[in-house]
Image (cartoon, rainbow, N blue to C red):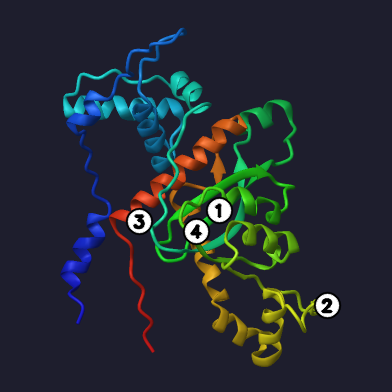
């Protein structure tokens, strides 16, 4: 039986905002003295990463991010310098964002891609010049852990890049053994099967074959995974194959993309590709952290 008072309180709690700084974070706010030649940075990598995380989560411009951090310090009574917007923009160009740590066990990797808009000129520019540029966007390729929902790998490319060509860069970011590779029909390519086999020969490649697909010439002696998928489809139908093979789990990758666009947004705010890659890595790290703090459990009711 549902306790509606507790449920109502939990909904309100989701809007609660609590900000604190640990002693370790305060001590690491300033960059360590540089021992090599060159300029001395004022702020540590941790500082820049934290500022860009706040920017991503609250969907702020860099100047607004500067103002938010300053107001937080004022409320907490912290005597720390605030990185200005130009510093954040410059440091984002070369910032290293730690990759997600995969689980110790084998990973069922779900892959998918989506488009992210690039920020366009404001309406004042359109009104002034009377023209609007063609909308530009980038393609985001992600690899999601089917068990945890975490984004383990990401690649940002131009919109004309084929999904299959990004399988190897995504797999290179996975540290745990690969149990299976699950994607939609865009990954139904020979080179995808070969790439997965190079990384993990025993991993299952679960990609729906085309309706016009035919068996390979070696089906009688050494059938491929794709041949076995075609046999299963012929015997149980495409819907039956999806349930038996686990292909339906790829919908969880679409869920991760939906979460990214609802929480972080569907547009990239940075102006250069290197800063955009940093922006995507920061966003994925923030979403993974949110999942660590609490993940909903769905139970099917018949």
Q: Position of residue 229 (x, y in %)?
A: 67, 80
Question: Mark 2 vs mark 1: which is more N-terminal?
Answer: 1
Element under label 2?
loop
Q: In terms of sequence position, does the residue under pointer 3 or pointer 1 come before the other? A: 1
Marks 4 and 2 in Cβ contact (< 8 Å): no
Residue 217: mark: 2
Q: Which residue is mark 4?
A: 144
Horizontal side, residue 17 vs residue 177: left or right: left
Q: Are discs 4 and 3 less than 8 Å apart at CB?
A: no
Q: Which residue is mark 1?
A: 142
Q: Is residue 140 left or right of residue 91?
A: right
Q: Spatial distance from mark 3 to mark 1, Cα to Cα?
A: 16 Å
Pinpoint residue 146: horizontal percent, then vertical percent.
Answer: 46, 65
Can you tell which quarter of the image residue 4 is in?
Answer: bottom left
Pointer 4 or 3: first along the chain: 4
Circle 1 residues within 10 Å: few <14, some 14–19, many ≥20: many
* Residue picked out by circle 3: 291
Question: Which residue is rendered at x = 72% and y = 53% of the image?
Answer: 162
Residue that appears at 68% across and 92% down: 235
Whether label 2 touches label 1, CB < 8 Å: no
Is residue 88 placed above or below 103 in the rendered structure? above
């Amino acid at each position: 039986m549902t306790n509606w008072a507790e449920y109502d309180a939990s909904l309100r709690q989701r809007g609660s905002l609590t900000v604190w700084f640990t002693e370790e974070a305060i001590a690491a706010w300033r960059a360590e003295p540089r021992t090599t030649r060159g300029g001395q940075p004022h702020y540590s990598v941790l500082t820049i990463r934290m500022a860009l995380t706040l920017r991503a989560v609250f969907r702020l411009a860099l100047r607004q991010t500067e103002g938010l951090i300053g107001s937080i310090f004022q409320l907490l009574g912290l005597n720390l310098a605030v990185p200005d917007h130009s510093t954040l923009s410059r440091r984002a160009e070369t910032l290293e964002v730690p990759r997600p740590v995969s689980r110790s066990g084998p990973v069922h990797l779900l892959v998918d891609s989506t488009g992210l808009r690039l920020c366009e000129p404001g309406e004042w520019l359109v009104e002034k010049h009377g023209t609007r540029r063609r909308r530009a966007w980038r393609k985001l390729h992600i690899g999601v852990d089917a068990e945890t929902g975490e984004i383990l790998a990401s690649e940002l490319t131009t919109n004309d890049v084929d999904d299959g060509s990004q399988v190897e860069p995504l797999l290179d970011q996975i540290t745990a053994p690969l149990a299976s590779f699950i994607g939609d029909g865009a990954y139904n390519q020979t080179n995808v099967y070969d790439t997965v086999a190079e990384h993990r020969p025993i991993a299952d490649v679960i990609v729906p074959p085309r309706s016009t697909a035919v068996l390979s010439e070696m089906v009688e002696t050494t059938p491929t995974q794709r041949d076995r998928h075609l046999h299963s489809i012929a015997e149980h139908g495409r819907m039956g194959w999806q349930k038996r093979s686990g292909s339906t789990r790829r919908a969880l990758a679409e869920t991760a993309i939906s979460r990214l666009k609802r929480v972080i947004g569907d547009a990239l705010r940075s102006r250069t590709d290197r800063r955009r890659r940093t922006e995507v890595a920061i966003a994925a790290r923030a979403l993974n952290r949110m999942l660590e703090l609490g993940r909903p459990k769905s139970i099917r009711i018949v």
